[in-house]
Image (cartoon, rainbow, N blue to C red):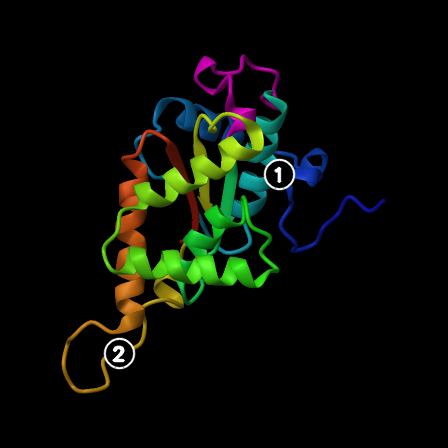
Amino acid sequence: LNPYRGLKALREQDADFLFGRNDDIDRFISAIAHEQDKLLLALGASGVGKSSLIFGGVFSAMERHALPDGGKWPEQLIDGRLWPRLSLTPGTNPVQSLVGAFIRQWIDPTTALFRTETKDWRDLLINGDSLAGLVDAADTAYVKKHGDPPPRYLIYVDQGEELYTRAGRDPARDGTSRETESQKDARCFSELLAEAVGDERIVVLMSARA
């Protein structure tokens, strides 16, 4: 077994290979416990291990209900193991990526039904619907599967800089300053994240390249 992953981001199953980030993990867990009404951001240069910190450190700690240095687990996160962790990258269609992160919790992402549902929900949100409706649908599906809705959803936006480097960059080609479809998608995604931060059922994390 080779513990060295090179440039690959560590995942939750690689938590035992993550070293030297205990203070960062502690700070993130404390922020999740005490600042759930804010967007929590891991900001740093490319390759410093932002994704590894979240997946291999923060998510693993929540799964184990244990801090890496053995400190006391926050009472606010006593049910943190039950929080569905929804991971996504913005890509070129950030709203669709956000919708997909929810819908894959109850629909197989390899099926045609997943693609249809994702497109339908994406269109609703782009046209002004609230994220609360999608969260309600996720709660309903979760109740059918588990009997109770989850205490919270933990949304993690990995490579958040893609919102600026890949989404919304198409210039208006008609010589005007009107909003393009890509720019509208990126703006809508930002507005939905702001809405999510204000929803007591959701906690939002993001990592982004400085």
Does 42 appear in magenta?
no
Displayed quadrant of residue 171: bottom left
Nearest to N terminus: mark 2 or mark 1:
1
Q: Position of residue 67 (x, y in %)?
A: 58, 21
Q: Which residues are magenta?
A: 67-83
| Residue drawn at (51%, 20%) of the image | 79
The kind of secondary structure the magenta stretch mainly shows is loop
Residue 42 placement, left or right of 39: right
| Residue at mark 1 | 56
Residue located 51% across and 17% down the image = 78
Q: Is residue 84 above or below residue 189?
A: above
Image location (x, y in percent) of residue 116: 47, 62
In this picture, residue 150 sits left or right of residue 68: left
- Under mark 1, the amino acid is Gly
Q: Residues within 10 Å of mark 2 (few under 14, many from 20)?
A: some
Secondary structure of residue under mark 2: loop
